[in-house]
Image (tube, rainbow, N blue to C red):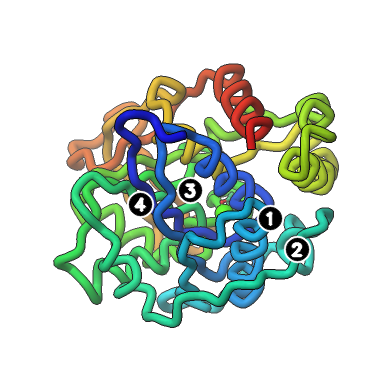
């Protein structure tokens, strides 16, 4: 059931374990109306991320939501995927039904432009290649607001200096931060504060096909984060961007300057966040600096249980 006034959103994603959970959270949140999904190459190749998005909607019984396959590579760089994180399929560890619906056969900039209307929030949770194409090809169709899972103030997960979504396509990220659009950045510094543990997975397992699917995803995702970072849980990065649109009290943001490094031997893809206003560069991003982790995880689990 939708809440009285639900916010329409479009998710641009590269499923990906946390992308899949973000889509399900959007479907389970009465404050939101998921209008469409566009897919981008990132965690896996475009064919796989697109197939995964269709499979998640098939599982959720929401094949009414249109899906458009976007960019199969970054604006200028070679694609770097993350099979070591998400597996060869991009959603390893979980069983999913075969998709029965096709994608919308359309240029992604046109697909997004036709669906952008006043009040809609674009929620990209992968590399920003599709958003850059939208700004370039359909400049008249600017979304009022973008809430992006990407970047970081101090963390790096693909290099010591950079977060994956920014690193895969820094030129695209640079275009988006320079666009002047109301942009929120949900970065690693806060997603790493809210870890989805085995206990959360057991809470969901057996609550139905969606809960079991999320638990299976978490089992796989947790193994990577335990082995790589010694974490006792997984950051469900992309779901935090969706949750922030549903409940803006969860994340604390700071309006400051963010620039993207695109020409560095060691720091390409770094989101240079002026956390302490050390420069006089103009503010352009609402950067996430803190999160109420317990309330975020409670919202995530209770919503997923309801599906
Ligand atoms: O760095 C984390 C981000 O990169 C998440 O969006 C994850 O899905 C990957 O795309
Ligand atoms: Ca993602």
Q: Find disc 2 in the rendering and name its residue.
A: 97
Label 4 and label 1: CA atoms lie apart by: 23 Å
Q: Are marks 1 and 2 in contact (CB under 8 Å)?
A: yes
Q: Which mark is residue 187?
A: none
Q: Residue 305 occupies which quadrant of the picture? A: top right
Q: Secondary structure at mark 1?
A: helix
Task: Name which of mark 4 and mark 1 comes first in the sequence.
Answer: 1
The residue carrying pointer 3 sits among few (fewer than 14), some (14 to 19) or many (20 or more) residues within 10 Å by Cα, namely many
In which quadrant is the C terminus drawn? Answer: top right
Judged from the image, the secondary structure of the residue bearing numbered disc 3 is: loop
Q: Nearer the viewer, mark 4 or mark 3?
A: 4
Q: Earlier in the sequence, mark 4 or mark 3?
A: 4
Residue 64: x %, y % from top left: 50, 61
Q: Which mark is residue 59?
A: 1
Name the foreground residue: 282 vs 45.
45
Is ligand 1 less than 8 Å from the beta carbon at label 3?
Answer: yes
C-alpha span from label 2 to label 3:
29 Å
When the figure is inspected, residue 4 is found, relative to residue 172, above or below; the finding is above
Is 304 on the left-hand or right-hand side of 270?
right
Residue at the image position 26 percent from the left and 67 percent from the top: 113
In the picture of the structure, the residue carrying the numbered disc 3 is 150
Find residue 178 and report its horizontal and vertical position in percent: 24, 56
Q: Nearer the viewer, residue 175 or 199?
A: 199
Question: Can residue 195 be seen in this snapshot?
Answer: yes
Q: Nearer the viewer, residue 222 or 276?
A: 222
Give the farthest residue toward the front.
Answer: 1
Disc 1 to disc 2, C-alpha distance? 6 Å
Horizontal side, residue 180 vs residue 126: left or right: left
Q: Compared to 187, does 232 lie above or below?
A: above
Asked whether disc 4 touches disc 1, contact meaning CB atoms under 8 Å apart, the reply is no
Q: Which mark is residue 122?
A: 4
Residue 268 in view of the camera = no
């Amino acid at each position: 059931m939708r809440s009285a006034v639900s916010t329409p959103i479009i998710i641009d994603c590269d499923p990906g374990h946390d992308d899949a959970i973000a889509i399900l959270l959007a479907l389970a949140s009465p404050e939101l109306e998921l209008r469409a999904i566009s897919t981008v190459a990132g965690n896996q190749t475009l064919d796989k991320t697109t197939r995964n998005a269709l499979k998640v909607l098939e599982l959720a019984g929401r094949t009414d939501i249109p899906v458009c396959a976007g960019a199969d590579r970054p604006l200028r760089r070679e694609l770097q995927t993350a099979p070591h994180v998400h597996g060869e399929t991009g959603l390893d560890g979980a069983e999913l039904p075969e998709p029965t619906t096709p994608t919308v056969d359309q240029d992604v900039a046109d697909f997004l432009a036709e669906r952008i209307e006043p009040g809609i929030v674009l929620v990209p949770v992968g590399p920003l290649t599709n958003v850059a194409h939208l700004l370039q090809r359909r400049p008249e169709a600017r979304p009022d607001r973008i809430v992006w899972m990407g970047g970081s103030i101090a963390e790096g997960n693909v290099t010591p200096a950079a977060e994956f979504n920014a690193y895969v396509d820094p030129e695209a990220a640079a275009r988006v931060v320079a666009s002047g659009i109301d942009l929120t950045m949900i970065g690693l510094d806060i997603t790493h504060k809210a870890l989805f543990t085995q206990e959360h997975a057991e809470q969901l397992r057996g609550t139905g096909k969606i809960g079991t699917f999320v638990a299976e995803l978490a089992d796989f995702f947790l193994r990577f984060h335990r082995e790589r970072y010694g974490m006792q849980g997984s950051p469900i990065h992309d779901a935090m961007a969706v949750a922030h649109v549903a409940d803006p009290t969860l994340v604390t943001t700071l309006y400051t300057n963010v620039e993207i490094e695109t020409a560095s031997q060691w720091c390409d893809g770094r989101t240079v966040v002026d956390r302490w206003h050390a420069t006089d560069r103009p503010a352009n991003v609402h950067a996430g600096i803190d999160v109420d982790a317990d309330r975020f995880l409670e919202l995530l689990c209770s919503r997923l249980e309801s599906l």
